[in-house]
Amino acid sequence: MTCASCVSRVERKLGKLDGVEALVNLPLESAHVTVPAAITDQQIVDTVNATGYKATVRETPAPHTLHAHHDAGHGHAHDGPAINSGEMRHELGQGDLRQHASKRGTSEHAEQMSLSERTEHDTTHGNHMQHGPAAAKLRPRLIVAAVLTVPVVLISMIPALQFPHWGWMAAALALPVVSWAAWPFHRAAAINARHFASTMDTLVSIGVLAAYLYSAWQLFANPMMTEHPGMESMEGVGGGLYFEVAAVVTTFLLLGRYLEANAKAKAGDALRALLSLGAKDATVLVGGVEHKIPAEQLQVGDVFVVRPGEKIATDGVVTHGASAVDTSLVTGESVPVEVGPDSPVTGATINTSGRLLVRATRVGADTTLAHMGRLVSQAQTGKAPIARLADRISAVFVPVVLVIAVLTFVLWLVFTGELNAAFTAAVAVLVIACPCALGLATPVGLLTGTGRGAQLGILIKGPQVLEDTRSVNTILLDKTGTVTSGKLAVDHTLALNGHSDTTVLTLAGAVEAASEHPIAHAIAAAAKAGLPDAATLPGVDGFTSAPGGGVRGTVVLDGTARTVVVGRSGWLEQNGVAPNAAQQGTLAAQENGGATAIWVAVDGQAAGIVSLRDTIKPGSAAAIARLKELGIRPMLLTGDNAAVAAQVAAAVGIAPGDVLAGVLPEGKVEAVRKLQQQGAIVAMAGDGVNDAAALAQSDLGIAMGSGTDVAIEAADLTVMGSDLGQLVQAIELSRETLRTIKTNLFWAFFYNAVGIPVAALGLLNPMIAGAAMAASSVLVVANSLRLRSFGK
């Protein structure tokens, strides 16, 4: 396919099949087709073939864990056991873009097809952006065209270089250019003509052949036309040779296609890089012996070894060892994450320090990396509402241009009587009008934007999301895990009965260091942080703990043994400690302020209160300030009490009136709905199962990637990291991608709207028109490629 007209025609033909919906992508040369169960693969392929293109439907083997290998000739996506995950995977015949197609119930299935004007296919794995005719195939035609065109232009345009009968030499040199070099244009035009259709290739082919054949007719009608240098026009014939126009237009258009093919390959680099991130090998531990196997052979439950510096082969859970894992490839976050036993890890991330044993939990198509690739691929195949306008225009564009070219020729001939001028104007109209830029404007912008997003750990589900981010004016932020880390940390210590804050925290930390409870970890960590360098917490004897109550033990500090009790009020009572009314009031005040308050008693007396709070993520306040700059009103949504919510809101810069506290999971949907009824366009950010319904209800659902699969599935936009700053970056990238697409479309429309009248008035030489037409496509692609530097 070469232009928006091709796309429109294939979609229209497929759409005539009962119940079929098709989305055709020009740069990827693929169609994503949703069909009822009654329609076979062969019907779809035959329909495309009848349109003048070649199509293939190909299935990639399912991961061996699904036990769903298909035979090459096996029926449809709705048959066979491969549907056990609700999805069917197809590969493109050309370039192998592996893509999941969502299954719409049991009666429909989706196909991923490769469309091509050629029957041969490149099935190199991972090469998802093989655009046909690819740059490598265009290169020899371009070189031959350029080498032969230069002398044609020189002898045609410079009288000093002309020699007797130079016209015949120009004709001979231009012939391979307009025939062999321009063959891709002629072939496509002929295929379309057979089906009574036209595309931009029709315009190019007619323009180039008309210029050459008109010139050849002139030369044969008067063989002595160029007998002398400078002699070209003979009275009574109409005169004028256009061999250089035919050659130059062909060369410029081939150059444009070549640059375009190269640029489009770059646009797909980000997704190609993403899909190739995975580890190639894995070291599996079987009976204590290490075996190296290809990573794709891993099965769920396998335990594999990851040494420092190695990539983690697949998603899993650490069973043994501790390390820091660099997750930047997947999440976009630069700070390594500390992992230990029971910590989840993601395939393609890098183990930086210790040796780890990991048990595989997801393999093949189920991994986070495969899911990311699938989401990006689906987004690139989709179509923004704005692109449908371009499609509707391009469907009638080429026939209208052909009519304008004929009218231009006739009117020039009627009003001026000059065949030469009439012909020049008509050819210029044909050449300037090619709607390549129109067809490329949306998909190349989308391709580059979503690819760059994937590199930053941002997954945009589809083109509609871009439109939604532009209109969003309110965002609901789930507090725990989104604005805050969801982990308690010591906020401050209050000493009672003459003890010092440091002593209270050190004694509490010494006893809590022996406990596994998250609150105990937080207190022990704070106590260690308060010690001088190289100092350690005192040891503990006689340690006991009660689930939900607290801990007790004997600690020797400064040579004195002390009995320390740490925990809730009930635990103190069980250990014979009774704080007085004033001390009880102090504890209540801490809890009313939104803190988790823990008693510390020493030798049977209340010695202090340790106050813990959920920690606010470091970048949250800055991210919320950026949201306000984008014209989005941030609101805090939480199930916690009003005091806690108000404190978090104040810390990050959210107005008190924009806090919704004490909201239950089912109330989150109602909160979104209420704001929508008030006229707000609502985005919702969350990470838990309890956020999924609200994410689906909102106009724009944003899943924080540290969250659950359910949340990610319900969202429109996924941020693979857990930083709120990435969420803002996701909105900024979406808006920038949409802006780029709109700029592309504006220039593509503007270019044709201005170019055609200028050419019809005879103010445009066909050679300049050819150069301008080629430049328009290259400019649209180059403008899209600017997105590759977003966020750098």
Image: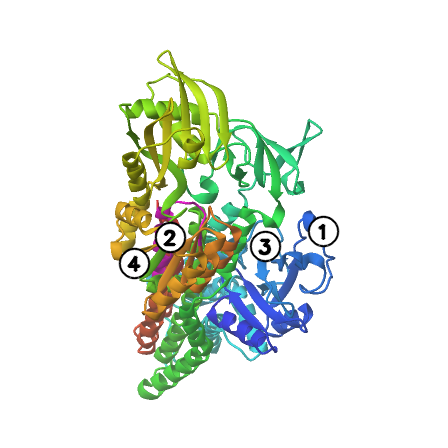
Mark found first going from the N terminus, 4 or 3: 3
Asked if residue 129 lies left or right of residue 75, the reply is left
Query: Residue 284, located in which quarter of the rendered image?
Result: top right
Indicate which label's residue lies in the foreground, 1 or 3.
Answer: 1
Residue 85 painted magenta: no
Label annotation for residue 67 = 1
Please give the residue where the numbered disc 4 appears in the rendered image: 632
Residue drawn 29% across the image and 23% down it: 499
Query: Can residue 479 be seen from the camera position used here?
Result: yes
Q: Which residue is mark 3?
A: 98
Residue type (three-letter) at the residue carrying disc 3: Arg
The front one of 648 and 773 is 648
Q: Which residues are magenta?
A: 718-740
For numbered disc 1, what is the local secondary structure?
loop
- Residue 27 location (% of width, % of height): 49, 60
Across and down, in percent, residue 329 comes to 47, 41
Q: Earlier in the sequence, mark 1 or mark 3?
A: 1
Disc 2: which residue: 638
Is residue 143 among the parts visible in the rendering? no
Q: Nearer the viewer, mark 4 or mark 3?
A: 4
